[in-house]
Amino acid sequence: MLLEPELLENAHVRLEPLKEAHREALRPLAQEEEIWALTSKRGDGAHFDPWFDLMLAGQDSGAQISHAVWSKATGAYAGHTAFLQIDRDNQRVEIGWTWYGAAYRGGVTNPACKALLFEHAFGGGAERVELKTHHLNERSQAAMLKLGAIREGTLRSHMRTWRGDRRDTVFFSILPSEWPGVKAGLDLRLAGA
């Protein structure tokens, strides 16, 4: 599987490989406490710099590929998304650490980003693309189902959140044979945007 940091772009968004230069552009967006309510790590307020440093470290080590999301409609940064758990030997990758400022939720931003990420992953030889979320994050679960991802199940007491409690994690995935149908659905959604 060939998956390297590179600029990904369509008519709606540009996904820029994360760099130090994105820190101050993303900081104001990350201040919404709602973004971090159900995450394993916190990134608002005083927690933003440690979170951002963690994203850069993952990028530097090759363990993940983070992206700053640029909205072409507004001419501003909209949030963050990443390839995580990159397993080249098993041709598997997770899409995660996805969050957007309030103005970018529920519209074209997420489907536009997912279209680019899935295309890049499957074009690079991925045999499995995973998504996962907190069992209480119904908005994310609904978005994953709307994409056409298959809900695989729930791992109980899977992770500790930044608050110290345990979360159950709901897993979804898309396989190469499912990608054409998912792509068609995303293309239809984006055509109407």
Image: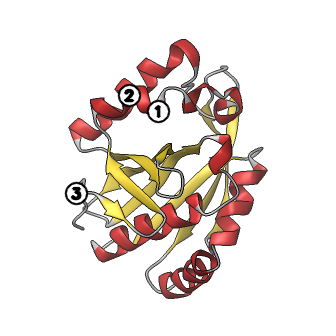
Rendered position, 35 above or below 133: above
Percent x, y of residue 33: 68, 26
Mark 2 surroundings within 10 Å by alpha-carbon count, few (fewer than 14), some (14 through 19), many (20 or more): some
Mark 3 surroundings within 10 Å by alpha-carbon count, few (fewer than 14), some (14 through 19), many (20 or more): some
Rendered position, 147 above or below 98: below
Q: In the rendered structure, are the residues bearing label 3 and label 2 in contact, judged by CB atoms less than 8 Å apart?
A: no
**Residue at the disc numbered 2:** 23
Q: Which residue is drawn at 28% across and 36% down?
A: 19
N-terminal of the pair, mark 3 or mark 2, is: 3
Percent x, y of residue 136: 77, 44
- Looking at the rendered structure, the kind of residue marked 2 is Arg
Mark drawn on residue 26: 1
184 left or right, relative to 134: left
Q: Quadrant of the C terminus?
A: bottom right
- Closer to the observer: label 1 or label 3? 1
Percent x, y of residue 68: 40, 44
Quadrant location of residue 134? top right
Mark 1 surroundings within 10 Å by alpha-carbon count, few (fewer than 14), some (14 through 19), many (20 or more): many
Q: How far apart are marks 2 and 1 (CA)?
A: 6 Å
**Residue at the disc numbered 3:** 4
Q: Which residue lies furthest to the top in this view?
A: 46
Q: Residue at x 57, y 58 (%)?
A: 109
32 left or right, relative to 184: right
Q: How many numbered callouts?
A: 3
